[in-house]
Amino acid sequence: MPDSPRFLMCPPDCYQVDYVINVWMEGNVDRSSRERAAEQWRGLHAVLQAHAEVELVPPAQGWPDMVFTANAGLVLGKTAIVSRFFHPERQGEEPHFKDWFEQAGFTVHELPEDLPFEGAGDALLDREGRWLWAGYGPRSELDSHPFLARWLGIEVLSLRLVDKRFYHLDTCFCPLAGGYLLYYPAAFDAYSNGLIERRVPAAKRFAVPEPDAVSFVCNAVNVGRKLIVNQAGEATRAWLGTAGFEVIETPLTEFMKAGGAAKCLTLRLDEAERADTRAIAAVESREVRLEGHLLDSGLLDRALDLIVDGAGSFQILEFNLGKQRQSTSDARLKVSAPSAEALERIMGQLIVLGAAGADGVGERGPRLEAVIQAGVAPADFSVTTIYPTEVKTARGWTRVEGQRMDGVIVVGSDGRAECRLIRDLQVGEQVVTGVDGIRLPRKTESREAAAEPGGAAADEFGFMGAGVSSERRVELVVEQIAWELRRIRDQGGKVVVVAGPVVIHTGGGAHLAGLIREGYVHVLLGGNAVAVHDMEQNILGTSLGMDMQRGVSVHGGHRHHLKVINTVRAHGGIAQTVAAGDLHGGVMYECVRRGVPFSLAGSIRDDGPLPDTVMDLLQAQADYARLIRGADMILMLSSMLHSIGVGNMTPAGVKLVCVDINPAVVTKLADRGSVESVGVVTDVGLFLSLLVAQLARLNGVHAAV
Ligand code: ARG
């Protein structure tokens, strides 16, 4: 039969599970029965022979996985790309398969050394020949895909494998005649699933249930309308039947112990080329340079993780390791991603780690796009972080002014660069888009800073180390904060306190008032509630109707806070209430007395509100931003929303202390990816009392010296 399909198989004479290179092999070393394997292989061979011509490659002693000829290479027309195995355990198969391809008359291509690609195990032609699906991740490298496109003159669609059990594309993906597809979606990342869904209409693809997937139903050999598999479950069979396929089961359990089944044991040799295909690979690459304590601070680790998590892949082109503890290293990496957008996303994150493009593209300056609608940024805007940032403008590398997170960068005609909120953009302003021409010069992080609890991120301030402290650490942390507060005060620095009403409920009001009185606090930020409850306590002795001395609710106390609001409204504001002699103590009183500026940002659930509460949120954000400017330290005391708001406006370098009884809140606030923030999980009233006591002790010591 001249044009019957042709397959390559390899007799299992040397087959055994000799080592573990995939999860299926775990616990199966030496556990495969040679006789049963031979019998099952003959079974598959016989079924296949009934529908196709089968050629054999002689097995080689010492290479037990050679039976899996799907991994010999990839064939299209008269071209064969011979595999480069990921694991040394299989690399010895390469010359045997190469010889076979050459003797069979194929034009053989070999990938660069160290660029793994495992043949038809990871590259499956659309059965209509329109394109090639190529897997990457566990075994094959993304960077091999452009070679496949070029050598085979076909479009390559890269799919990322994310489930250890499905380490080759052919274990979870099976293109069928007529444009049908059998696959297990959970084996792929979201981007790959999107790609599959765009190429194969829903009616033509079947997502196999997990039990079928793990019995390798996708590892099927498709010849015309026949499908040869190890085993197929009810639902998959039914779908295949409707699509017009006949299922032929042949048991291959001995080979599943090595992680393979029907498709793995065969290689289709007569893949026909189409005249209308073109070499296309969406894979994009860039070179970047990283400098610093790459190994001991974990920076390189983080960069590589981020690349892989972003569906990309990397090659380390150069690495110069610093020899001494203080010396830094530098590396040049090639970063690849399955699409231009994916690469841009990865580059954006690498830049935050301090990486710089090493291919000169960034040196040309950023891509600027004009604002065409006020308050709306160009679609591809780059978003700012808390870290000092520079852009390449007419003035050279220029520091962005007003650094904060979640803004965009506007470059003026004079070459100055400024951080701006999207809502404040004016028509015609030039906004930085993409990732080129931006850099974040980070001071090199020492191994000591990196070793601080939770202090994984690079930054310049070794303040206490980021992280959430346990109860036992609270006192230690308080000592450091007290020392820092006193230093800032004595140097004429600036401390901002963001406080929630819990400060008052937990009895911390008097302590906070004391700190203000002693000159430790220079700005107070909060909402309506903290001020209301503070004044309720100082005017009526209750907090939300609870007697603060005895801890019991007071008869009729539920209206106390409204009484206070009413009184303040009558006076026209907090300062006027103090002036009228109706407020004699507490947090708000001390602010007024000491001239400490405060801003109360309103919210939907506010009672009253107080005349001082700013109900226009844009105005409130602007007030906060103005008051925060120049802060050395910000104490966030049991307030979540107001603190998050403050965090967003604060550049790196300002020391943040977040205190809350709820660890989730503390983690959220302290986790700014920088070492200068610290979280304290404790009762805020207790924290403030410890802080005040520690300051008193410090001052006592100081006075005595
Ligand atoms: N033990 C072999 C390996 O892990 C099994 C290969 C299965 N082949 C395949 N095309 N999925 O490499």
Image (spheres, grey):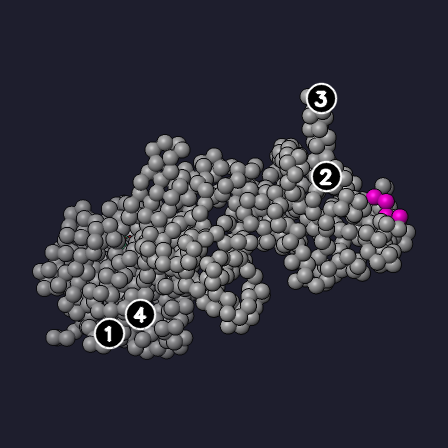
- Kind of residue at badge 3: Ala
- Whether ligand 1 has any atom under 8 Å from the Cβ at mark 4 is answered as no
x, y percent for residue 317: 28, 48
In space, the residues marked 3 and 4 are separated at their CA atoms by: 83 Å
- Kind of residue at badge 2: Gly
- Kind of residue at badge 4: Pro
For residue 175, the mark is 4
Q: Secondary structure at mark 1?
A: loop
Q: Earlier in the sequence, mark 4 or mark 2?
A: 4
Q: Secondary structure at mark 3?
A: helix
Which residues make up the magenta segment?
581-585
For residue 519, the mark is 2
Name the residue: 22% across, 65% down. Answer: 150
Name the residue: 21% across, 62% down. Answer: 74
For residue 395, the mark is none
x, y percent for residue 234: 40, 69
Residue 169 visible from this viewpoint: no
Q: Earlier in the sequence, mark 4 or mark 1?
A: 4
Answer with the quadrant where ligand 1 appears in the image.
bottom left
User: Which residue carries the number 3 mark?
Assistant: 704
User: Which residue carries the number 1 mark?
Assistant: 277
Task: Please give left or right for residue 654 compared with residue 605 in the image.
Answer: left
Principal secondary structure, stretch drawn in magenta: loop
In space, the residues marked 1 and 2 are separated at their CA atoms by: 75 Å
Mark 4 or mark 2, which is nearer to you?
A: 2
